[in-house]
Image: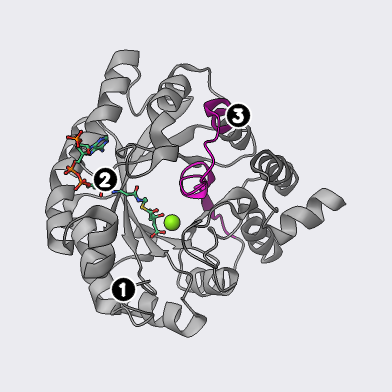
Amino acid sequence: LASDHVRIVEVGPRDGLQNEKKSIPKETKLELIQRLAKTGVTTIEAGSFVPAKWVPQMASTSEICEQLLTSPPPSQNTIAYNYLVPNIKGLESLVKIMDATGVPADSKPGTTTEVSLFAAATEAFSKANTNCSIAESLERIKPIVALAKTKNIRVRGYVSVALGCPYEGPDVDPSKVADITASLLEMGADEVSVADTTGMGTAPRTNELLTTLKAAGIASTDLALHFHDTYGQALVNTIVGLEHGIRIFDSSVGGLGGCPYSKGATGNVSTEDLIHTIHSLGMNTGISLEEMSKIGTWISGELGRVNDSRAGKATSAR
Ligand code: HMG
Ligand code: MG
């Protein structure tokens, strides 16, 4: 693997926090985002515009978004703040804030605004997560992409349960994942993050999936990988992804995440472990492992949880 740049998408403030049972103060979330923005990371998922009755923890996203849009740039690089939107209503809420603050999506230098949309590779998960079928969810996504494009908002698509589903098991059809990924790209998504929601993915099945995506004509440069580390396979699967030419990976600081209702479920692969692995291969991320590790220690303390990052704990102890 030649020296190369990998872009890490920090999803901790959204994927990492969305399932925390205890309400986290808005100030803590903002501090988390603002500290992350100083590590060298260039894309941060800052929240989601979803109904509070579905995900109460994300109810402060509007205020956080407004604050981020009106604060001075946090660092010398341009930071893309990304928000998850499940439907057009979610995007309209974001656009309203952008219009009210007068900050366009592609303002430079400083910050840019992006959105993420999500579809699932199994019917059962689609129903549970978006209350509709896969086909309906793709129909729902079309006008969201169209509206985002008129506002110059970059669009990321997600395909959930690509390597295993809590309802349908580990054998998710890779060609189904390829079809949905292709649909999202055809609709205008700028990249698609293929997600191992359950962490059931293994190296051979990740290889099979990525081989199928390639055979379907999907370029590795259009893909990101989003591994949850439930079975401890995220870094192994990351290496498989790197070998397939993928250079965008999602992770959360301190390995934040996990669902309090689902026994044994863990968060995303930790950003610190991902940085350590990528740097060990002679590749670069532009992110300081030391700074990221300090944030992992701090936020774990704030949430009263164990720091789930091995590299983070080791680095902080040095
Ligand atoms: P629904 O209940 O079918 O929606 O949910 P609805 O259109 O019937 O609306 C119900 C109520 O919600 C209405 O209010 C709407 O106005 C309101 P009421 O009339 O009852 O007062 N509403 C909204 N409010 C605020 N913001 C909105 C919004 N939309 C409707 N955007 C829906 C359908 C898609 C909204 C719901 O299923 C949903 O929010 N799902 C998202 C759940 C979620 O956030 N999941 C976690 C994120 S995905 C993830 O973690 C996976 C990922 O990490 C990748 C991976 O690992 O797999 C990305
Ligand atoms: Mg996720």
Q: Which residue is mark 3?
A: 31
Mark 1 or mark 2: which is in front?
Answer: 2
Question: Where are the magenta residues, as a range?
Answer: 4-30
How packed mark 1 is, by other alpha carbons closer than 10 Å (few <14, some 14-19, many 20 or more), is many
Q: Is residue 24 shown left or right of residue 193?
A: right
Q: Which residue is mark 2?
A: 86
Mark 1 or mark 3: which is in front?
Answer: 3
Vertical relation: 51 (above or below) 239: above
Going by the numbered disc 2, the residue's amino acid type is: Pro
For marks 1 and 3, the one nearer the N-term is 3
For marks 2 and 3, the one nearer the N-term is 3
> Which residue is drawn at the image coordinates 51% and 80% (left, top)?
203
Residue 147 location, x and y as percent?
17, 35
> Which residue is drawn at the image coordinates 62% and 62% (left, top)?
3
How packed mark 3 is, by other alpha carbons closer than 10 Å (few <14, some 14-19, many 20 or more), is few
Q: Is mark 2 within 8 Å of ligand 1?
A: yes
Q: Is residue 116 shown left or right of residue 19?
A: left
Q: CA distance from mark 1 to mark 3?
A: 38 Å
User: Which quadrant contains ligand 2?
Assistant: bottom left
Q: Which residue is mark 1?
A: 213
